[in-house]
Image (cartoon, grey):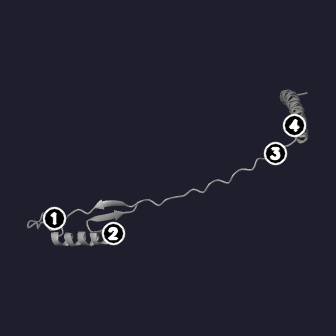
Amino acid sequence: MNNTTIAHIGGELVVLSGISFLFYKKTNSLKKDLDLVTEKNKELTEVVNSLQEHIQRLSMAVMQLQESHFQQPKPMRVPQQPPKPVVVQPPKPSVIQKPKIEVESDSEDSGDETLDDSVLDKELESELSKLNCDGDTCKLVD
């Protein structure tokens, strides 16, 4: 046997032992995971069983309540008087005294952008004429 053959066999042994080690580690980790899943499955099975027992006890209690409810005589119902109708009164209009307007002519204006006093007086008079006024009193309805 020459050196190259021995080196080749040694390399194959190293590769095979590495692969064997990896498989050993992987199977051990999978076994631990399987044990954890099995334990969790047992715990969940116990929880489900206890919940099923609770459900059975509750259903028995409901059935007993229903049976006792049907066996008791129902109380007589007393007729109720119909409610009285509610009368709503419309709001009363409030009375406001119409202010007396004193018109003073202002000969000096503050600038070109302002309206003339006579134009403003006409606008105020038209707005007052639109109000519901009776003499010196105007009525507001809320």
For numbered disc 3, what is the local secondary structure?
Answer: loop
The reply to whether dot 1 and dot 2 touch (C-beta < 8 Å) is no
Gap in Å between the C-alphas at discs 1 and 3?
Answer: 78 Å
Q: In this view, does 125 lie above or below 74?
A: below
Looking at numbered disc 3 in the image, what kind of residue is underneath it? Met
Q: Residue at x 15, y 67 (%)?
A: 103
Tell which of 10 and 62 is nearer to you: 62
How many neighbours does mark 2 have within 10 angstroms: few (below 14), some (14-19), or many (20 or more)?
A: few
Outermost residue on the left side: it is: 107
For numbered disc 4, what is the local secondary structure?
Answer: helix
Gap in Å between the C-alphas at discs 2 and 3?
Answer: 61 Å
Tell which of 139 and 78 is nearer to you: 78
| Residue 126 left/right relative to 72 | left
Residue under numbered circle 4: 65
Observer able to see residue 12: no
- Where residue 77 appears, as percent x and y from the top left, is 79, 47
How many neighbours does mark 1 have within 10 angstroms: few (below 14), some (14-19), or many (20 or more)?
A: few
Residue 110 location, quadrant = bottom left
Which circle, 2 or 3, is nearer the viewer?
A: 3
Tell which of 69 and 24 is nearer to you: 69
* Image quadrant occupied by the N terminus: top right
Residue 69 location, quadrant = top right
- Where residue 6 appears, as percent x and y from the top left, is 87, 27
Residue under numbered circle 1: 102
Looking at numbered disc 2 in the image, what kind of residue is underneath it? Asn
Q: Earlier in the sequence, mark 1 or mark 4?
A: 4
As drawn, the label of residue 76 is: 3
